[in-house]
C-alpha cells in the first residue's frame, strides 16, 4: 500500500508540473518585457497660399490685392501711350500648387464723342503678356516684345497653367498695355461729354498640384480644388 501511495503522489507531482508549464506557455505572462513608444508622429495640415506680385522696375515687388492699382494714377491715354507692369506668382504656402491667371475688363464707363457717339475704350486699347528676363529699355522694346501676340483688352486673356512647389516663384511676366497710333477721333471724347474709362481686372486661381506623396503615391490630390 505504501508503494502504491508513493506512486500516486509522484504521478500527481508530475501532472502538476506539466500543468504549470502548459499554463505558462499559454499565458501572456513573461519575466522579461519590452515595448516601443513613439510620441513624435506629428500631423500638420498643409497650407495652400498663392500670391500675385507686381513691379514697375523689376526690383521692388508689391503684393496685389483687390484694391491695387498697378497703373499710373490719372494717366490720360492717347494714341501711342504705353504702360508696362511686371508680374510674378509666388507660392507662399507649404503645398505644391498649379495656377492660372486671367485678364478681363472688370468695369467700364462708356464715353461720348463730340458728335455724341459711344466710346468703349476696351475696343481701342491693346495688350500683350510675355515672359521677360529683364525690364524693357524703352517703349519700343516693350512694344516689339509683344508684337504679333497682342489682343484688344475686350478680348481678355487666360494664361497657360503654371506649376510651383512650396516657396517657389514664377518667371517674370511683362504686361504691356498701349493705345495704337492708328486710333483716331473715334476714341476722342468731346468736351463736356462723358469721359470713357475701363477697370482692368486680373484674377489668379490656384489649386493643389499632384506632387506630395502619401502611402500610395502622389495622386490623392489630383482632383484638388482651390
Image: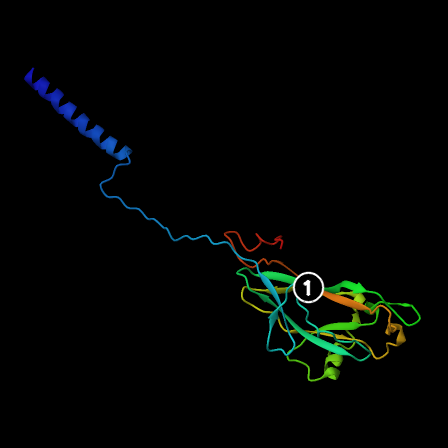
User: Which residue position holds label 1?
Assistant: 101
Q: Position of residue 19 (x, y in %)?
A: 22, 28
Residue at disc 1, secondary structure: strand
* Quarter of the figure with residue 106: bottom right
Q: Position of residue 64 (x, y in %)?
A: 63, 67
Q: Nearer the viewer, residue 77 or 58?
A: 77
Image quadrant containing the C terminus: bottom right
Q: Residue furthest left?
A: 2
Q: Is residue 121 visible?
A: yes
* Quarter of the figure with residue 65: bottom right
Bin the neighbour count of mark 1 within 10 Å (Cα to Cα): few under 14, some 14-19, many 20 and up. some
Residue at coordinates 54% horizontally, 59% vertically from top-left? 95
Please say if 36 is above or below 128: above
Q: Nearer the viewer, residue 133 or 86?
A: 86
Residue at coordinates 80% horizontally, 66% vertically from top-left? 154
Residue at coordinates 59% horizontally, 61% vertically from top-left? 97
Please say if 214 is above or below 193: above
Q: Position of residue 151 (x, y in %)?
A: 79, 70
Residue 222 as seen in the image, left or right of residue 12? right
Q: Position of residue 45 (x, y in %)?
A: 50, 54
Amino acid at each position: 500500500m505504501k508503494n502504491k501511495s508513493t506512486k500516486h503522489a509522484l504521478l500527481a507531482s508530475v501532472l502538476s508540473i506539466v500543468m504549470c508549464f502548459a499554463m505558462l506557455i499559454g499565458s501572456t505572462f513573461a519575466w522579461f518585457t519590452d515595448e516601443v513608444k513613439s510620441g513624435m508622429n506629428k500631423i500638420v495640415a498643409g497650407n495652400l497660399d498663392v500670391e500675385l506680385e507686381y513691379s514697375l522696375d523689376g526690383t521692388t515687388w508689391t503684393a496685389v490685392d483687390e484694391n491695387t492699382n498697378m497703373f499710373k494714377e490719372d494717366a490720360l491715354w492717347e494714341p501711342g501711350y504705353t504702360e508696362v507692369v511686371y508680374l510674378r506668382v509666388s507660392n507662399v504656402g507649404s503645398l505644391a500648387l498649379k495656377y492660372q491667371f486671367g485678364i478681363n475688363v472688370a468695369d467700364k464707363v462708356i464715353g461720348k464723342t463730340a458728335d455724341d457717339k459711344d466710346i468703349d475704350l476696351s475696343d481701342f486699347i491693346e495688350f500683350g503678356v510675355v515672359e521677360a528676363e529683364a525690364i524693357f529699355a524703352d517703349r519700343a522694346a516693350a512694344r516689339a516684345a509683344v508684337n504679333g501676340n497682342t489682343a484688344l483688352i475686350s478680348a481678355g486673356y487666360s494664361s497657360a497653367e503654371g506649376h510651383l512647389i512650396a516657396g517657389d516663384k514664377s518667371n517674370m511676366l511683362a504686361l504691356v498695355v498701349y493705345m495704337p497710333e492708328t486710333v483716331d477721333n473715334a476714341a476722342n471724347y468731346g468736351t463736356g461729354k462723358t469721359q470713357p474709362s475701363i477697370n482692368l481686372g486680373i484674377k489668379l486661381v490656384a489649386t493643389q498640384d499632384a506632387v506630395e506623396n502619401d502611402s500610395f503615391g502622389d495622386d490623392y490630390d489630383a482632383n484638388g480644388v482651390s
